[in-house]
Image (cartoon, grey):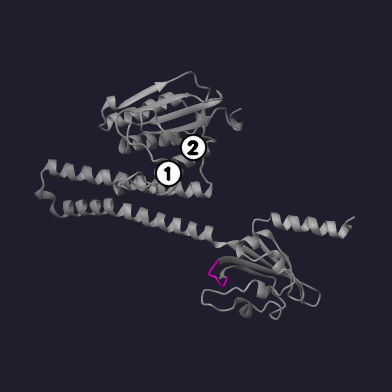
Amino acid sequence: MPSAEGASRSVQEDMNDDLPDGLLVADRDARVITFNAAAVRMTGIAGADAIGRDFRDVLPLHDAEGRDWWKCLAPYDGLATRTRHPERSLFLPGGVELLVTAAYRRDGEGRVRRFTVCLRDAAVRARQERDRADLVSTVAHELRSPLTSVKGFTATLLAKWTRFNDDQKRVMLETVNADADRVTRLITELLDVSRIEAGRLEMRRQVVDLVEETRKVIAGRVAAGEAEDRFRFEARGELPEMWLDPDKVDQILGNLVENAVRHGAGTVTIVVEPDAHKEGAAVSVRDEGEGIPPEAVPRVFRQFWRGPGGNRRGGTGLGLYIVKGLVEAHGGTITVRRAPGGGAEFRFTMPAGAPDYAS
């Protein structure tokens, strides 16, 4: 029958293995006494091979300049006032990058009783940093063109105002106005991405008529010059009371309809109906274009995704990412599949019900 101490140790080991971060603990003699499952996964070192060995041999970390980190740190020989070390990027001999933090447990005389090292996979953070760099680069690239146009036309008008007739001035000012709108949209997209990533989207919910909101979006496209027969709208069944953020609903619908018009072909069909459980609403936006290749479907809602051909004129590639974030902020879901007519069908659902403060 196992002893109470052995049972307690087993439970502690199980708890350590449940941790998402790698954990190495060394005793007063610098021997490894804990090496959890996450540490095994990150380093490729078996737990049985780590326990009882000097932690510096088990985890030979180097900084970016190739210096032995443990020699620089001298955990057991340095200042007795040290309690922890902040996160730092370090490397295993094979080049694997880890984010490492460390902490000390000392006895009454300041000697190290236990030295704890926590490890995190640096790949995720590196990918996030690349995504942020890509975002800045993409938005900067997209901003350059309209700002160059605005600067060029305004400088020309200021320098040569009397040389242009009224029609020429109007054309130039309309171009400046359109480019200023484009800059505003790009900045709005950038702010939306930032809020989605930080989980700071503010929802101003009120009762929204999804049918009327959809009609309004279609009317706006027609007023902007699209042929009225390009769109078909179907309202099926009675919807429950929907408490949504009207501005964000307009943004969702506008983005999906614009995506269908720009990248699809044929008639754009928008269907608004109760969801499968009659507990909310479902909206489908379909086109009759080439559709989305099956292998691309998992990437559709990622940042910077563009359809087949990757046309730079198609925008920043942030629209569908933002749509997904706005839908999920409402508690809904969005999917994409092949439409009955052969193109793409984006379908999102929104839950019904009033928020707590409205009850």
Q: Is residue 93 highlighted in magenta? A: yes
| Vertical arrangement, residue 78 with respect to residue 177, above or below | below
- Label 2 sits on what residue type? Val
Q: Position of residue 107 (x, y in %)?
A: 80, 73
Highlighted magenta segment, given as a residue range: 92-96
SS class, disc 2: helix
Q: Nearer the viewer, residue 251 or 8?
A: 8
Q: Position of residue 56 (x, y in %)?
A: 66, 75
* Residues packed near mark 1 inside 10 Å, few (<14), some (14 to 19) or many (20 plus): few
At horizontal 21% and vertical 54% (from top left) the residue drawn is 152
Q: Is residue 4 left or right of residue 118?
A: right
Quadrant of the image for the N terminus? bottom right
Q: Is residue 96 left or right of residue 30?
A: left
At horizontal 52% and vertical 39% (from top left) the residue drawn is 329
Q: Main secondary structure of the magenta part?
A: loop
- Label 1 sits on what residue type? Glu
Q: Where is mark 1, residue-wise?
A: 295
Q: Is residue 283 left or right of residue 29?
A: left
Q: Is residue 342 left or right of residue 170?
A: right
* Residues packed near mark 2 inside 10 Å, few (<14), some (14 to 19) or many (20 plus): some
Res. 306 mark: none
Q: In which quarter of the view is residue 58 placed?
A: bottom right
Res. 327 mark: 2
Q: Position of residue 5 (x, y in %)?
A: 86, 60
Mark with earlier residue (2, 1): 1
Q: Is residue 61 highlighted in magenta? A: no
Q: Nearer the viewer, residue 338 or 85?
A: 338
Q: Position of residue 161 (x, y in %)?
A: 14, 50
